[in-house]
Structure formats: C-alpha cells, structure tokens
C-alpha cells in the first residue's frame, strides 16, 4: 500500500496529477477514518479518498524518469490499428485503458488516436479522449523528467510530426 505525505504528488487515475494537500481524520457513519485530501493540478478539483482505499482507487506515485523514457518508446512504436472496430467500441476500450491509471496504457491511447487522426477525422468522443490522454501524460512526464510541459509538448510534436 502506498502512503503519501502532505506535499507529495500522486496520480489519480483518469484525473491526472494531484498534490496531497492534507490528511484528515473524519467521523463517517460513526467510524473514524483517515482521508487523503488531493488537489488535482489540472482543474483544482479537491478529492477526499480514505487512506485505506488508496490502492483500490488506483492512486499511485508519479512515475520515475526511466518510466517516462519508456512512455516515449511506446509513443514512437507504430503498431497497425485494427480498423474493423467501430469508433464507439474503440472509445470504450480507450476509456478503460485510461481508467487503469497505467501511464503505459494512457500512452498507447494517445499514440493510437494520433495515428488514427493522421488517417481520418476523429469522432467527438475520440477527440476528447485524445485531449484527456494528452493532458494526463504531459503533466506527469514533465514532473518525472524535471522539464517544463512545453518541452514535453515539443517532444510529442516531434514524435507525431504535428
């Protein structure tokens, strides 16, 4: 089980990087429970998660610099996307990958959607997923590698030739 302290950065699956801004004890239904208070950096949303549920929810530490380098390897791979699936089925599959909280799965979603985008117009849902995957990766990679989000964006643009 991961433990975090105030000031730590953590990844909240499908929401992105959050900062632990507090650890509070609350009385819920007659039981005392400890909660992590997380502030999502992307949109300043505050979330309370019972410390005992942190693994169940999938909150994890920020990736290492080596793991960030693995993400770039995944983004550079050019695997053929099976076009026989409908956009809504792809959407569901990609959404499931994003919800896992795995940075590698999110990278696969970003890569696949960029590749599809190069061939044809993305559906509205796919465009939103592309933006979500993009945002999730940009922030975490910039923190992991100690570089700005703009530098990560430049790397993405060079990989996808955008």
Image (cartoon, rainbow, N blue to C red):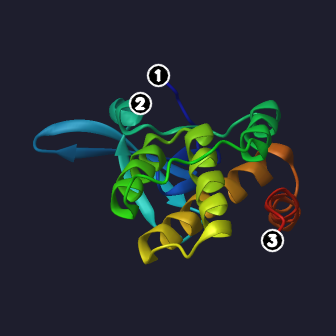
Q: Quadrant of residue 115?
A: bottom right
Q: Secondary structure at mark 1?
A: loop
Establish if 60 lies above or below 1.
below
**How far from the left and from the top, in percent, is residue 137?**
66, 54
First in sequence: mark 2 vs mark 1: 1
Which mark is nearer the camera, 3 or 2?
3
Q: Quadrant of residue 114?
A: bottom right
* Residue 55 marker: 2
Disc 2 to disc 1: CB gap under 8 Å? yes
Residue, far left: 29
Q: Secondary structure at mark 2?
A: helix
Quadrant of image for the C terminus: bottom right
**How far from the left and from the top, in percent, is residue 60?**
54, 36
**How far from the left and from the top, in percent, is residue 149?**
80, 63
- The residue located at (55%, 55%) in the rendering is 16
Establish if 27 lies above or below 154.
above
Find the distance from the CA under tag 2 to the CA under tag 1. Answer: 6 Å
Which mark is nearer the camera, 1 or 3?
3
Find the distance from the CA under tag 1 to the CA under tag 3. Answer: 40 Å
Q: Is residue 133 left or right of residue 49?
A: right
Disc 3 to disc 2: CB gap under 8 Å? no
First in sequence: mark 1 vs mark 3: 1
- The residue located at (65%, 48%) in the rendering is 7
Q: Is residue 115 left or right of residue 130?
A: right
Establish if 130 lies above or below 70.
below
**Mark 1, residue position:** 1
**Mark 3, residue position:** 162
Establish if 134 lies above or below 145.
below
Tell me if mark 2 has few (under 14), some (14-19) or many (20+) residues whose alpha carbon lies within 10 angstroms of its own: few
First in sequence: mark 3 vs mark 2: 2
**How far from the left and from the top, in percent, is residue 47?**
40, 57
Find the distance from the CA under tag 3 to the CA under tag 2. Answer: 37 Å
């Amino acid at each position: 089980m991961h433990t975090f302290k105030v000031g730590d950065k953590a990844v909240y699956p499908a929401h992105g990087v959050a900062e632990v801004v507090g650890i509070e004890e609350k009385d819920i239904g007659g039981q005392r429970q400890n909660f992590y208070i997380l502030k999502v950096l992307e949109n300043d949303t505050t979330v309370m998660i019972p410390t005992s549920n942190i693994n169940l929810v999938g909150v994890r530490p920020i990736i290492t610099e080596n793991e960030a380098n693995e993400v770039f390897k995944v983004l550079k791979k050019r695997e053929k996307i099976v076009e026989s699936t409908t956009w809504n089925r792809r959407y569901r599959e990609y959404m499931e990958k994003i919800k896992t909280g795995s940075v590698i799965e999110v990278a696969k979603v970003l890569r696949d959607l960029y590749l599809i985008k190069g061939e044809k117009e993305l559906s509205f849902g796919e465009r939103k997923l592309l933006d979500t995957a993009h945002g999730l990766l940009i922030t975490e990679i910039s923190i992991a590698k100690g570089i700005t989000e703009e530098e990560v964006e430049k790397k993405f643009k060079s990989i996808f030739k955008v």
